[in-house]
């Protein structure tokens, strides 16, 4: 199957905003803990003393038969194949259409309720703290 050209940009520059805040907080907390207990964490030492190689053991796994949902799905699949006179195969499901439809109309149901709720909450917080959120605040 010929490889298709990606329909999105690639090899683009990604801005670096430095170390993630949660990572920085974790590193700070680890340094404080090491100082408090007087011991520096050493991953190699930890691995040598506390990580053991998994050794498989023999155990019996009970066989309860096929899951009820799987049995039901297989039954429904067989009924649909009979009704539609079409045998479903993995290759048919994974086939790439010759032409991907473009430019079709999409219904506009307005702004998503979750987005509206988030914007309402943002307005409340901005009013309470007398500060307007900007992308500069987030990137700092």
Image (tube, grey):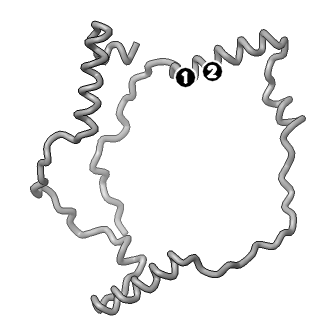
Q: Residue at x 76, y 72 (%)?
A: 61
Task: Please say if the residues under marks 1 and 2 sit with CB atoms less than 8 Å apart.
Answer: yes
Q: Nearer the viewer, residue 21 or 91?
A: 21
**Looking at the image, which residue sits at the far top?**
130
Q: Nearer the viewer, residue 39 or 44?
A: 39
Q: Residue at x 77, y 15 (%)?
A: 34
Instruction: Measuring from the top left, give residue 133's x and y in whole percent.
Output: 29, 15
Horizontal side, residue 31 vs residue 95: left or right: right
Label at residue 22: 1
Q: Which residue in the structure is indicated by mark 2?
A: 26
Q: Quadrant of residue 132?
A: top left
Q: CA distance from mark 1 to mark 2?
A: 6 Å
Question: Helix, strand, or loop for circle 2?
Answer: helix
Q: Quadrant of residue 2?
A: bottom left
Q: Residue at x 79, y 10 (%)?
A: 36
| Quadrant of the snapshot with the N terminus | bottom left
Q: Residue at x 51, y 82 (%)?
A: 71
Instruction: Measuring from the top left, give residue 99's x and y in whole percent.
Output: 20, 66
Label 2 CA crowd tier, 10 Å (few <14, some 14–19, many 20+): few
């Amino acid at each position: 199957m010929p490889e298709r050209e990606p329909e999105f940009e690639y090899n683009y520059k990604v801005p670096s905003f430095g170390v993630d805040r949660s990572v920085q907080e974790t590193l700070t907390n680890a340094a404080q803990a090491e100082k408090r207990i007087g011991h520096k964490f050493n991953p190699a030492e930890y691995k040598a003393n506390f990580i053991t190689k998994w050794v498989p053991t023999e155990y019996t796994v009970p066989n309860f038969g096929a899951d009820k949902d799987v049995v039901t799905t297989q039954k429904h699949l067989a009924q649909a194949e009979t009704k539609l006179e079409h045998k479903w195969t993995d290759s048919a499901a994974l086939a790439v259409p010759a032409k991907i439809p473009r430019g079709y109309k999409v219904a506009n149901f307005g702004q998503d309720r979750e987005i509206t709720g988030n914007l309402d909450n943002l307005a409340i917080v901005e009013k309470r703290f007398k500060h307007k959120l900007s992308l500069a605040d987030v990137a700092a």
